[in-house]
Amino acid sequence: MKDRSGRILVIGAGMAGLTAARTLADAGRHVLVLEARDRVGGRIRTLRDQSEILELGAEFIHGHPDELWGLIHEAGLRTYALDGKNICHKNGKLRKCDEQGEVFKFLNGLEKWKGVDLAFADYPPLAKLSPEKQDDVINYVQSFNAADYRRIGVHALAVQQRAEEEIAGGEVFRVLDGYDRVPEFMANKVREAGGRIELSRTVEKIVWERGRVQVFVRDGGELAQYSAEQAVIALPLGVLQNLGVIFDPLPAALIAARQLAMGPVRRFTLLFSERWWAAHDQKLSKLSFLFAHDAMPPVWWTAHPQDTPTLTGWIGGPRSAAFDQFTREQVGDAACKELAQIFAVPVAMLRGQLLCCATHDWQTDPLSCGAYSYVPAGALDAVLTMATPVKQTLYFAGEHTDTTGHWGTVHAAMRSGLRAAKQVLSAGRAQLSVVSRTARRV
Ligand SMILES: Cc1cc2nc3c(=O)[nH]c(=O)nc-3n(C[C@H](O)[C@H](O)[C@H](O)COP(=O)(O)OP(=O)(O)OC[C@H]3O[C@@H](n4cnc5c(N)ncnc54)[C@H](O)[C@@H]3O)c2cc1C
């Protein structure tokens, strides 16, 4: 067995692991990142089909989170803001709508809830809405959070709503050159600062005690061992919950991880030969989001203001099971049928124009085991437990460990990586103050 040593190991080269690695390497620490995939970026994955950019994971920059925008500017990446019309499909008709505005108004009221933490389904004001409004709110909560509304907690939703307001989360942007340029740039910065990133290294087991970590990695057919004094564990929540990596002994953070939830999403992008919806109805030429609650998927969007002929379908939460086991071709086929109904156009025309259907199944991917996390009722403390250093030796990072309420986003992953790196760098009492400050925030 090979033995390779490093002072700090970072497990996982998603945005959390890369952010931690860069911060530590910039501070002069000897850092080695181990990543199972043959690329960095984790749940940021971009496909390029000739001149088209197709995102399979994260696509949007939500609002103005400083750390993400700082990196984008540093990398000189081009972005653009989403604008255009939001359209609802209801009772067989397409009409302009401000569905999100009404939903946000309702969700802003969550902050006033002073009672115990409840599942959103049991939140008393929800029952007072008309059945139609209830549907709108539940669909939004499930879609956006990839959550089951019978589990997601009212307290966490309130924290998240406030957090989004603070960064003007309603303003949404895309990276013109593809989101994967962000982690690629970050990985280069890690290397420039003297850190190392080893790809195709699947961690199987972590044996640890105070001040000593041994990581066992499958390197082709061979088992390799890496040793370090500390490790930042930036693995997805789903991987931790499914014991994709064995910890010996089991840290309390992993028991806390079981209280959190990893939500499912089915997301796919259909690339057509032209923007047929704009040709079909001039009023749709600026179509941005389409909400069609009775359809599957219930949420769609175009690339507007870019004129790329794509339509992306999104099903977040339990309803995504409708597309479980579907091949890419079956997803494309089912989506064309649904679109034909919504837009009242012949399905054969859509099938004829469909060039490809790009999708990735994050649920069955063993390196993610789900799309992103949410916080069930009563589980807010579990986030803090996960964000607390374990015997100054293990430091958990990843979007699910964010203590600022932005779970399930790229900037949450970055914040968690930054927090973990700061904890490593400021051992002792300073670590505790970081945690207690964030505790007050949550
Ligand atoms: C479909 C979808 C759409 C999304 N849309 C958006 C969006 O529009 N905007 C937004 O802000 N966020 C979005 N997100 C969420 C965002 O992608 C994530 O919150 C963020 O990328 C998570 O980063 P991370 O570093 O915490 O985890 P990851 O990116 O998952 O990184 C973890 C890394 O660990 C690696 N790993 C796993 N197991 C092992 C192992 N055994 N050994 C070694 N390495 C291992 C993985 O390969 C991965 O690279 C979306 C996510 C999905 C799935």
Image (cartoon, grey):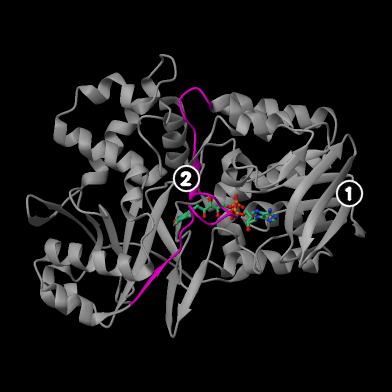
Q: Nearer the viewer, residue 316 or 24?
A: 316
In this rendering, is residue 335 above or below 5? below
Front: mark 1 or 2: 1
- With 190 as the anchor, is 367 left or right in this view? left
Residue 343 part of the magenta-drawn span: no
**Ligand 1 visible in quadrant:** bottom right
The quadrant where residue 6 appears: bottom right
Report helix, strand or loop for mark 1: strand
- Residue 429 placement: quadrant: top right
Q: Is residue 364 magenta?
A: yes
Q: Gap in Å between the C-alphas at discs 1 and 2?
A: 37 Å
Which residue was labeled with disc 1? 228
Q: Is mark 2 within 8 Å of ligand 1?
A: no
Q: Is residue 298 above or below residue 158?
A: below
Image quadrant containing the N terminus? bottom right
Q: Is residue 307 visible?
A: no
419 vs 112: above or below: below
Compared across the picture, whether 437 is left or right of 80 comes to right
From the viewer's perspective, is 428 left or right of 133?
Answer: right
Magenta stretch: dominant secondary structure:
loop
**Residue corresponding to mark 2:** 167
Q: Which amino acid type is marked by label 1?
A: Ala
Mark 2 burial class by Cα count in 10 Å: few <14, some 14-19, many 20+? some
Residue at image point 15% right, 36% down: 132
Residues shaded magenta: 356-379
Q: Earlier in the sequence, mark 1 or mark 2?
A: 2
Q: Give the position of the C terminus as an image quadrant.
A: top right
